[in-house]
Image (cartoon, rainbow, N blue to C red):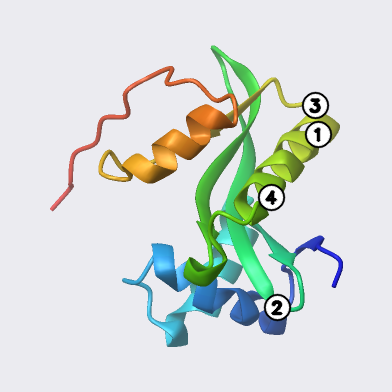
Amino acid sequence: MKETITLARTEQEILACYPVMAELRPHIPQDDFVQVVTRLQRDAGFQMACLTDGDIKAVAGFRISEWLGGGRYLEIEDLATKSDARSKGYGGTLLDWLVEHARKHECHHLKLVSNTSRLDAHRFYLRKGMSLDAYYFSVKIP
């Protein structure tokens, strides 16, 4: 079957992405997933792209934004490939699509935040030509 990449917009399309996204974000219960994604789409410009090849193999959550210092950019918040479909090129194909999507939307950068413990993912990003440009600091607000 031919690979296709589409944006998940309807509740049914969003829900179909859940099994792959849950591998990366297991803390979000399936019952809450559609509501959270649709709220982020409505309030924060969040979008979700999915790569299918018979079924959904990879999913990316992203948004386009702008920084005063760096200009317009596409930020990938989530990039997940189904565990039994890893190392088959699906994640790379989806990342390439995101780069082209950023270009079409006049972004100057593509950015991705990745947890420091995800070393396999970091090696993948570096192989795809990404560089480590900054540290991301955070503090929990009680």
Tag 2's secondary structure? loop
Residue indicated by mark 3: 106
Q: Residue at x 61, y 62 (%)?
A: 58
Mark-to-mark CA distance, 3 and 2: 31 Å
| Image x and y of residue 133, in percent | 43, 17
- The reply, left or right, for residue 28 in relation to residue 2 is left
Mark-to-mark CA distance, 2 and 4: 14 Å
Mark 2 neighbour class, 10 Å CA radius: few under 14, some 14 to 19, many 20 or more: few
Q: Nearer the viewer, residue 118 or 109?
A: 118
| Image x and y of residue 109, in percent | 64, 23
Of the residues shown, which amino acid type is indicated by label 1?
A: His
Q: Quadrant of residue 72?
A: top right
Identity of the residue furthest to the front in this view: 88
Mark 1 neighbour class, 10 Å CA radius: few under 14, some 14 to 19, many 20 or more: few
Residue 139 seen: yes
Residue indicated by mark 4: 94
Of the residues shown, which amino acid type is indicated by label 3?
A: Glu
- The reply, left or right, for residue 136 in relation to residue 106 is left
Of the image marks 3 and 2, the number of the one nearer the N terminus: 2
